[in-house]
Image (tube, grey):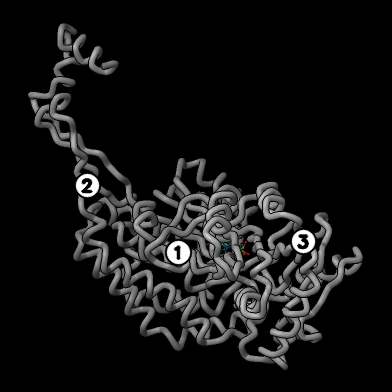
Amino acid sequence: MQETTREALDALFTKQKAAFRANNNPSYEQRMEWLRALEKWMMDLRPEIQRAVAEDFSVHSPAITDIFETGGVLGRNRYIQAFLEEWMAPSPRPLPPEAHGSSTCEVILQPQGVMGNISPWNFPIECSLVMVNEMLAAGNRVIVKVSELAPATADLLQRTVGDYFDDDVLAIVAGGIEFSQYFSGLPWDHLTYTGNTSVGRLIMQEAAKNLTPVTLELGGKNPTIFLDDGIDEQHILEYLSFKFCKSGQICTSPDYALVPEGRLEEWIDIAKSVWQKAYPQFIGHPDVTGIINDRHYNRLLDWLEEARQSGAEVIALNDEEPDPQTRQMPMYLVVNPGEELAVMREEVFGPITPIKTYSSVEEAYDYIAGRERPLASYLVTAARNEADVESFKRSIISGGAGVNVFGFQAAWPGAPFGGTGGSGIGCHAGKEGFLNYCHAKTVFNCAQDNPVKVSVCVPYGEVTQAVADASFG
Ligand code: NAD
């Protein structure tokens, strides 16, 4: 990874600002060209991305890199290419002729300008580039600040971006916390940050100094409610499969599980049995993603130790030990942890499931409502009873939700993805994501036969009074 200097960042920023001023309305064809360049970049780099991500995580399945990282960017890109022309079209807003005569009103979408994008280590490709699709589609220019904690991937993006983009359209910069602070203080036209909630607060404070609008894609503790009818081998295997993916280092990973009272032992027994069947030998298996670095590896072990010390039962599903060399960790359960423990206060972001019990679904909803709003909430139910699903959907306020599935609500390019409250502000993906990176400008083109216009021309008279009275008619 090449640390970018502040001077180099300033020069790029100035260059992009000038390029935007010179062309603040890129054509559809121009935007499609940018999108196709991004598509080609991802297609060409597939094997190198697999290698770089594996280097950063110590162990990372190439298939999972293809699906979640490179494939995530490609899927979004192609979806936008199919809809861009439709999304860019001006939107006429009909006016009542008795008020506005033959005037017209329309909403046109303008680019916002030069955008900063700060990305985290956990999806070093996807979180750096997936929303760049919408940013470019909306006609903006972008500088991405990649995470210093995924240096091999950062290096790959830095070395190759110039083969596909002029740096006044898209540039990649890299640096640590101080550089990131400087980056977030520049007068961007929009600043997007993906990462943890406490840094999100700092980013927003920096952006506020310039009145820069922000999109914050943050984390949180995503609950999973198991209904009575969801406790079986298939559903628990599905839960563990997503929790396991990237060793839980995904913002939409289920964080803790809520299980009906009286079913806890059964849930745990099923979890042990399905997991041992899936992976008789777990640690050392190439499917098991390593924890990103020693700091996070030790953080997770410390939290488990704290839970043990408190008297909570800690279960390693395969009865195996973590490996400090590869940073692979077993799948752990922490049974009925106290609320004061780190595993219940903080986002786990690792292969640990705290499990709590509930006596009624309303109690489970209430428990979730008493905490910070999560990025995702999940319901597991074999019956998929309409009333149960409806009450789950409506009762919990979260960024997105999944019924009998995890993460899919964040992966479909046709629907928005974003948090609420502590889990974020704004969104990307879907038409809503495209709009997030546009300015919706209303243009009112007034005709002389417009009675409302006549009514506010001085001196006020009969028409003024008639329009005033009509407002109350
Ligand atoms: P990280 O440590 O890589 O930090 C993210 C970015 O913030 C990096 O580019 C880093 O340089 C920068 N940064 C760190 N400290 C900073 C500071 N004080 N000021 C300015 N910039 C700073 O990643 P992380 O935060 O550990 O990422 C994991 C978190 O991100 C989890 O909470 C996860 O849930 C969340 N996340 C959310 C989404 C989403 O789309 N909502 C996606 C991925 C990850």
**Which residue is nearer to you in this view: 154 or 253?**
253
* Kind of residue at badge 2: Ser
User: Which is more N-terminal, label 1 or label 2?
Assistant: 2
Indicate the position of residue 34 as horizontal and vertical percent values.
28, 68
Q: Which residue carries the number 1 mark?
A: 144
Q: On the image, which quarter does residue 326 sit in?
A: bottom right
- Residue at image position (46%, 86%) is 48
Dot 1: what SS? strand
Q: On the image, which quarter does residue 334 sit in?
A: bottom right
- Residue at image position (49%, 76%) is 68
Frontmost of labels 3 and 1 is 3
- Residue at image position (17%, 30%) is 96
Q: Few, some or many C-alpha atoms within 10 Å of disc 3 (few <14, some 14-19, many ≥20)?
A: some
* Kind of residue at badge 1: Val
Dot 2: what SS? strand
User: Which is more N-terminal, label 2 or label 3?
Assistant: 2
Q: Which mark is residue 91?
A: 2
* Kind of residue at badge 3: Thr
Q: Few, some or many C-alpha atoms within 10 Å of disc 2 (few <14, some 14-19, many ≥20)?
A: some
- Residue at image position (46%, 51%) is 426
From the viewer's perspective, tell me whether residue 96 is left or right of residue 3: left
From the viewer's perspective, tell me whether residue 189 is left or right of residue 31: right
**Which residue is nearer to you in this view: 7 or 287?**
287
Q: Quick check: 426 above or below 380? A: above
Q: Which mark is residue 357?
A: 3
Frontmost of labels 2 and 1 is 2
Q: Is mark 1 within 8 Å of ligand 1?
A: no
Q: Quick check: 228 above or below 289? A: above
Decide if residue 258 is in sight here: yes
Indicate the position of residue 220 as horizontal and vertical percent values.
63, 58
Decide if residue 15 is in sight here: no
Q: Are marks 2 and 1 in contact (CB under 8 Å)?
A: no
